[in-house]
Image (cartoon, rainbow, N blue to C red):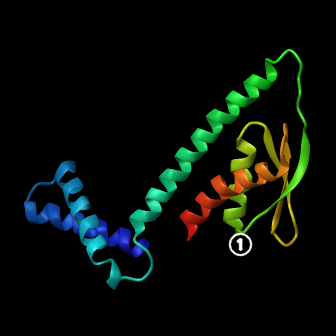
């Protein structure tokens, strides 16, 4: 992936020299041209096309922002109810993530989302223990985290 980024920057700089125009817009055109060339030549390079990783990272950030807004709305609804009807609890989230940075990212995304807090990661790094402010259905809570954050992190890293 790093090789592809460097190659794309080299293509953009070469485009600037060939165009004899040293402006940002010429660099941007060269960069887009480089992305196109690398995409067409992707089968000759090892690994996946780097722009797919960038798109996956953008999707992860947008997913986090969406979950952040939705969980803030849920917390505000719970706080402003006249009678608080919450079922707090601690549960274990089995994870398929293997690398330490993936597990750390998942734990941080869970902690940064209001209403949940990552407490601990098991010794074998297969389970993250989470405290949730309101657990109506344990299975749906686990499934929701696995289908959103864990799936998005796996798209970024694999």
- In the rendered image, the residue lying farthest to the top is 82
At 36% across and 82% down in the image, what residue appears? 45
Is 139 rendered above or below residue 68?
below
Q: In the image, is residue 151 above or below residue 98? A: above
Residue at the spot x=53%, y=45% of the render? 62
Residue 30 location (% of width, % of height): 20, 61
Judging by the rendered image, the residue that carries numbered circle 1 is 98
Q: Residue at x 26, y 74 (%)?
A: 40
Q: Is residue 26 above or below residue 76?
A: below
Q: Is residue 9 left or right of residue 123?
A: left
Rendered location of residue 138, percent (x, y): 84, 49
The quadrant in which the N terminus is found is bottom left
Q: In the rendered image, which quarter is residue 155 located in? A: bottom right
Q: Is residue 118 left or right of residue 6?
A: right
Q: Is residue 97 above or below residue 119?
A: below
87 sits left or right of 32 in the view: right
Give the structural element (helix, strand or loop) at label 1.
loop
Along the viewing direction, whichever of 79 and 32 lies nearer the viewer: 79
Q: Choose top left, top right, bottom left or bottom right for residue 27.
A: bottom left
**Front one among 109 and 11:** 109
Query: Crowding at label 1, few (<14), some or many (≥20) Cα neighbours within 10 Å?
Result: few
x, y (%) of residue 2?
A: 43, 72
Q: Is residue 47 left or right of residue 117?
A: left
Name the foreground residue: 88 vs 101: 88
């Amino acid at each position: 992936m790093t090789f592809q980024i460097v190659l794309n920057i080299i293509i953009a700089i070469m485009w600037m020299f060939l165009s004899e125009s040293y402006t940002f817009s010429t660099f941007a055109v060269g960069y887009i041209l480089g992305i196109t060339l690398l995409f067409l030549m992707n089968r000759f390079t090892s690994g996946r096309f780097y722009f797919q990783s960038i798109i996956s990272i953008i999707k992860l950030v947008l997913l986090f922002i969406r979950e952040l807004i939705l969980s803030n709305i849920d917390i505000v609804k719970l706080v402003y109810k006249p009678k608080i009807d919450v079922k707090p609890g601690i549960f274990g989230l089995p994870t398929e993530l293997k690398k330490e940075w993936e597990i750390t990212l998942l734990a941080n995304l869970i902690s940064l989302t209001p209403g949940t807090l990552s407490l601990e990661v098991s010794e074998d790094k297969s389970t993250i223990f989470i405290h949730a402010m309101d657990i109506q259905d344990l299975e749906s809570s686990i499934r929701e985290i696995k289908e959103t954050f864990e799936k998005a992190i796996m798209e970024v890293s694999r």
